[in-house]
Image (spheres, rainbow, N blue to C red):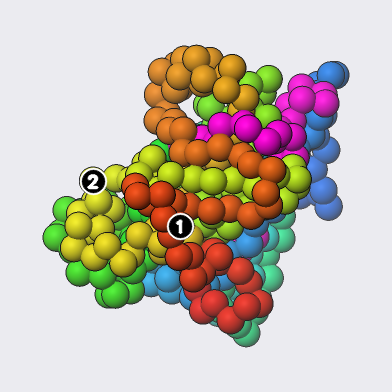
Amino acid sequence: MAALGEFELIERYFAPLAADLPGARGLKDDAAVLALPAGEDLVATCDAMVAGVHFLPDDPPDLVARKLLRVNLSDLAAMGAVPTSHLLALALPAPVDEAWVAGFAAGLAEDQGAFGVVLAGGDTVATPGPPTLALTALGRVAAGRALSRAGAASGDDVYVTGTIGDAHLGLAVLQGRLDVAEEPAAWLADRYRLPQPRLALGPALIGVASAALDVSDGLVADLGHLCAASGVGAELDFDAIPMSSAAKLVLTDSQDMAASLVAGGDDYELVFTAPASAAAAIAELAQETRVAIARIGSTTPQPGVRVRDAAGRPLELADGGYRHFRGDARR
């Protein structure tokens, strides 16, 4: 890596991020040694991000790092887990851009502090291709209590957190495909670059939700995964799906974008099911965690996910969400 070698890079930028975790051993051993409290399960998840696919090549490196951590933390939230630490693998073009690495490490440090996680180890290599980043997040949950995609029953209510479609629109703004006023444009771009993992709500849904997962590839596609795992279908009311004021502004100008908002990815909200009897408990959780939760439909015996407009007509969903290896250029 030319002037800055692999081990110098680790020592300078990443060993400080592991200082608060004794089991990381200063990133000087082959692996970390992590203890798990009695009565708890380890929850592990891994997501990779490639420049030009999951983030724009000119995105600020600190925001890239924060998004990489947050998309993994969102997976832990969907399992009801509390995050503890993470492993990081970086494949960077040589010679390494030290300013980019410094910005990346600073962003990672900021969100480690915000979410209470510590770097436990990883790997750093050179690549002739675009920057490729992978992070494995580790969390803990009471033994046998992790949330699952399987478990929804026909007749359960379907809920989603936050608002849907903002990240899809934010990417369009950043790519110059969507022209909106400066203030909503900045807000939408921020939603794309900095998802909000629902870590306070996820663990609180244990014992309340019947099934859950996070919305990464699009609301309809991801809810479809939950339904397939649970052996049910779902019917959603488009008008009940929560939209931000910025998204509503876009829809006012272009109603034909409605279908793309429920199919677009990168929301990193939670979609979950629960029996009707849990409605009051879910309303209380929304207040306690300060996370907006909306009921958007219900599960059905018929497979598949259907979205209906205010008149009860099915919404044409040309795109089933983002899928790798299908030819999608980027999220």
Q: Name the residue under label 1.
A: 314
User: Along the line of sight, which residue is nearer the eye, 309 or 175?
Assistant: 309
Q: Which of 4 and 44 is in front in this view?
A: 44
Q: What residue type is labelled 2?
A: Ser
The disc label shown at residue 245, or none:
2
Outermost residue on the bottom side: it is 128
Magenta residue span: 133-161
The answer to whether 315 is drawn above or below residue 206 in the figure is below
Image vertical order of residue 192 relative to residue 75, above or below = below
Which structural element holds mark 1? loop
Judge the density around disc 1: few (<14), some (14-19), many (≥20) Cα neighbours within 10 Å: some
Which residue lies at the image location 38% right of the left edge and 40% below the top edge? 240
Which of the image's four quarters has the N terminus? bottom right
Q: Which residue is drawn at 43% across and 33% down?
A: 294
Give the Cα distance between marks 2 and 1: 24 Å
- Is 13 left or right of 168, judged from the image as shown? right
Secondary-structure class at tag 2: helix
Question: Residue at the location (59% across, 45% down)?
Answer: 234
> Residue 106 at x, y = what percent?
45, 50
Q: Tell me which numbered mark, 2 or 1, is placed earlier along the sequence.
A: 2
23 versus 123 height, above or below:
above
